[in-house]
Amino acid sequence: MDARAAEQLRWFGGAQLLALVRADPGITRAAAASRLGIGSGGATDLVARLRRAALLDEIPAPARGRGRPTTVLTPHAAGPLVLAVEVGAATWRLARAGLDGLHEVADEGEHSGTRLSHLLAELRDAVGQAYRQAPQRIAAVSVSVAGTVSGTRLVQFTTRGWNDVELSVLTDSLPVPMLIGNDATLAGLAEARTGAAREAGTALHLMVAVGLGGTLVVDGVPVAGAHGAAGEYGHIPFGDPDLVCPCGARACWDLSVDGRALARHLDDPVPADPVAYAHRLLAEGPTARTAAAFTTVATALGAGIGGLVNLHDPDVVTLGGVAVGVRAAAPTAFDQAYRGGLMSFRKPAAPPVLDGAHGDEGPLRGAVLNGLDHITTEAALAQWARTHSG
C-alpha cells in the first residue's frame, strides 16, 4: 500500500462519523462510538483528528436542568462548504451548505426568456461570486438540472429546446470539482436520505414538472445507468402513440401526466409554463370543466406507477412536483388505476405511494447531498486535511 492509499484509509472512520453526525444531529460522542462499534479511546482520538482538520467540533448541548452538561458533535464552523445550483424550467437558485446538509439560498433568478449563452454566463458569475466569498472552504459545486444529463453535459432540456450543452463552463475557472444530476434523480436522493422514503431499502421517486422523471434509489444510492442518464420514466411509451414527444419518440408518458396533458384535455393552448398552468388549475380546485381532465391525467399517472412497481419492486413510491396535486385532485381514479396496473400477487401488500416530504426543495436538497457525498469520501477528507489541519 502506498502512502497516499494509507492516508486515505486513515479517513475511513472519519467519513463514517461525519455521515452519522449529519444523519443524527445532536449525537453525543459516546452514542456515536457505540453506533460505529469503536471504543471510547478510539472515538476521542477520531474526534480530535477531525477537530484539528476543521471538520468536526464538540459543543455543549442545550441545558436540560441540573447536572453535568452534555456535549454533542457538530460540524466545525470553519468546515467545508458545498455550493448547490438548481436550474429549473424557468428559474434558478444557488445555495450553500455545510456538513450538516442545511442549505441557505444565496442567489436566484429567472431564465424563461433568456438565451442559453446568457443563462450560462449568469450562472457562471453567480457561482464565481459565491466561491470568492469563501474560497478556502468551498469544496465542490453540485448542480441540479431539469433535463437529461450525462457526465457534465445537459443532453436535453426539452422545455427550451436545448441539446448537448456542456455545463463544465460554470466552474472552469475554479479549483473545485463540479457534479451534475437530474432534478428528479436528486429529489429522489433527498427523499431516500432524509424524507418520506428514509426507512426504505428500495425506493422509487417520481416527479412531474414539464414531463415526468424519477429515480430508483437502492440503499440510499440512485441507480444512475451506464451513462448517468437513468430515470427518464417520462419517455416510456405509456402514452398516446399518436403524440410525438419533443424528445423525438412517440407515446411518451410525459405527455399524459403534466400540465400539457391537462391543457390538451381541456382544449386549451399548449401552456408556455406547464407547471404554472397545472398549479393554477389545482389552486382553483376541480370544477365541472376540469374534473374529467384531472381524472384522465390521474388515471394515466396511477396506471404507469403500477407498471413501474411491477418492474422495480420498491418498498415505497414517493411523489414530487405536480404529481402530488394531480393525485389529490382525483384520488379515487389514481388509486384504481394504480391497483389495476399491479400484478395480482402485489395487490394484497401494494407499496404505499406517499407524497414527498421535501416538496419543491427536493432537487436543491438532493444537490447538496450529492455534493456532500463527494467531499466526505476518504480521499476528499484526506485532501482537505492536508491543507486545513491546525
Image (cartoon, rainbow, N blue to C red):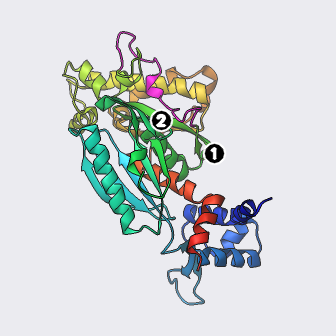
Type of amino acid under label 2? Gly
Residue 194, placed above or below residue 29? above
Give the numbered dot on residue 390.
none
Q: Residues within 10 Å of mark 1 (few under 14, many from 20)?
A: some
The range drawn in magenta is: 224-245
Give the numbered dot on residue 214.
2
Residue extending furthest toward the right = 1
User: Horizontally, is 66 left or right of 333 in the view?
Assistant: right
Residue 351, placed above or below residue 178? above
Q: Position of residue 104 (x, y in %)?
A: 37, 62
- Residue 240 falls within the magenta-colored stretch: yes
Type of amino acid under label 1? Asp
Between the C-alphas of marks 2 and 1, the distance is: 16 Å
- Residue 1 falls within the magenta-colored stretch: no
Q: Quadrant of residue 69?
A: bottom right
Q: Position of residue 167 (x, y in %)?
A: 41, 42
Between residue 91 and residue 177, name the one nearer to us: 177
- The residue depicted at 28 percent of the width and 53 percent of the height is 108
Reading the chain from its start, which is encountered first: label 2 or label 1? 2
Q: Residues within 10 Å of mark 2 (few under 14, many from 20)?
A: many
Q: Quadrant of residue 312?
A: top right
Which secondary structure is most common in the magenta stretch?
loop
User: Horizontally, is 346 left or right of 106 in the view?
Assistant: right
The total number of labels drawn is: 2
The residue labelled by disc 1 is 219
